[in-house]
Image (cartoon, coloured by chain):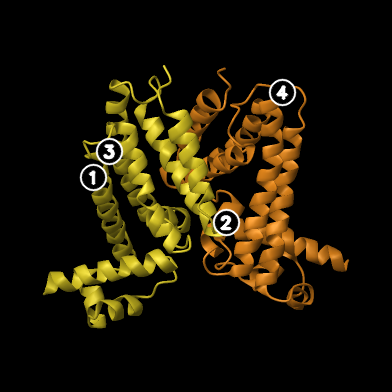
Chain colours: A orange, B yellow
Amino acid sequence: MATDAKKRMLKEGALIVHRKGFNATGVAEIVKAAGVPKGSFYFYFDSKEAFGLELIDEYSLMIAGIAKAHFTDETKNALERIRAFFSSFVDFFTENEFRDGCPIGNLCLEMGDISRPFQEKLKSAIEAFQEGMATIISQGQKQGEILPDVPPESIADFLFSGFQGALLQMKVKKSIEPYRAFETLVFDRMLENAG
Amino acid sequence: MATDAKKRMLKEGALIVHRKGFNATGVAEIVKAAGVPKGSFYFYFDSKEAFGLELIDEYSLMIAGIAKAHFTDETKNALERIRAFFSSFVDFFTENEFRDGCPIGNLCLEMGDISRPFQEKLKSAIEAFQEGMATIISQGQKQGEILPDVPPESIADFLFSGFQGALLQMKVKKSIEPYRAFETLVFDRMLENAG
């Protein structure tokens, strides 16, 4: 029951912070959405910041789950697996009118400059995600499917940038076009091993 | 004198909002930094939002000035001009410990979902900037310097995404590496017309 209350606060908090940002989300809102007494919050979390840091783990786990489903899909080659992972968010963003974006990317811009613990935790989360992607890229390079002679870590870093920037633009352009430009240039033109 | 007070509020406000974000910046802070009486703010701006919308013009003019200097540099070909434009920010970001990022990109994430006037104004600002870049790209394609048969508008959109995403990552990685990954993949590998 105790653990359940904590899980519910993280789960509901993740939704609210994704929509409104971390600073605009109040503790009262989180406990209300989770249906737990207000006192529970500070029983489970030392501070709102401590809660925010656990939220980063929550988001990372969610994204890692989606990534794993695509990255282990043996019906596709490495490049197709990565493309399918990014494309899997398209329907969500389109139905959601391109609001909200990536919860990790949002926190980078919102909290990166103002909280050292957030900055360090977000850095670790991004690096862990990119390591997983670099592994697939490296396999694709060995199979001759992906542009060789560029470090897989640089390709993973670059894919993350291109996707985050497309999300940022989609938020104001209210169109899937920035994602399509990213997808076309990266997957149709750049990473495919022409040799 | 009157116009001067307005200009100073926009100039000082631009610096503060770039550092702290729009919502975290107070009117009192802006008038203090500009050295004008508090009443002046609402004499020149109908609301803080109206001020924010003029700030977008302020940032756009600043960026357009830097872009023009690089885009008209006849000692370079089209691809080199665009690369020089993006690279011109590297020293600023490095000296600034990768804080702050792009003022336009920051406002997209902070305000895109919560204010329709901001969303529309940011959209126009980004589109105007990308049109200018698409013109240079199109010239480069005609000269055979840049990957042909991809619409120049898509390339401009994609370059903007890659750069914004790199800035976002630099904020938490505290390293120039995300910019280098973007630069290497885009300018050394992707856009160069291999044909």
Residue A166 visible in image: no
- Do tags 2 and 4 sit on the same chain? no
Q: Are marks 4 and 3 in contact (CB under 8 Å)?
A: no
Chain that bears disc 4: A
Q: Are marks 4 and 1 in contact (CB under 8 Å)?
A: no
Q: Which residue is mark 2?
A: B173
Q: Which residue is mark 1?
A: B68
Which residue is painted at 20% across and 70% down in the image? B6
Which residue is painted at 43% across and 20% down in the image? B194
- Do tags 2 and 1 sit on the same chain? yes
Q: From the top left corner, tell me how far across and down residue A1 is, in percent.
A: 88, 66
Residue B98 versus residue A83: which sits nearer the camera? B98
Q: From the top left corner, tell me how far across and down residue B37 is, in percent.
A: 23, 83
Which quadrant of the structure image shows residue A146?
top right
- Do tags 3 and 2 sit on the same chain? yes
Hey, what amino acid is under mark 4? Lys
Q: Which residue is mark 4?
A: A76
What is the distance, in whole Å, between disc 2 and disc 1 at their CAs?
30 Å
Residue pushed farthest right? A1
Q: Earlier along the polypeptide chain: callout 3 or callout 2?
A: 3
- Left or right: residue A166 compared with residue B12: right
Q: Earlier along the polypeptide chain: callout 1 or callout 3?
A: 1
Callout 4 secondary element: loop
Q: From the top left corner, tell me how far across and down residue A98 is, in percent.
A: 51, 44
Chain that bears disc 3: B
- The disc placed on residue B132 is 3
Q: Which of the two marks, 3 or 2, is nearer to us in this view?
A: 2
- The disc placed on residue A146 is none
Callout 2 secondary element: helix
Residue pushed farthest left? B1
Q: Which of the two marks, 2 or 4, is nearer to us in this view?
A: 2
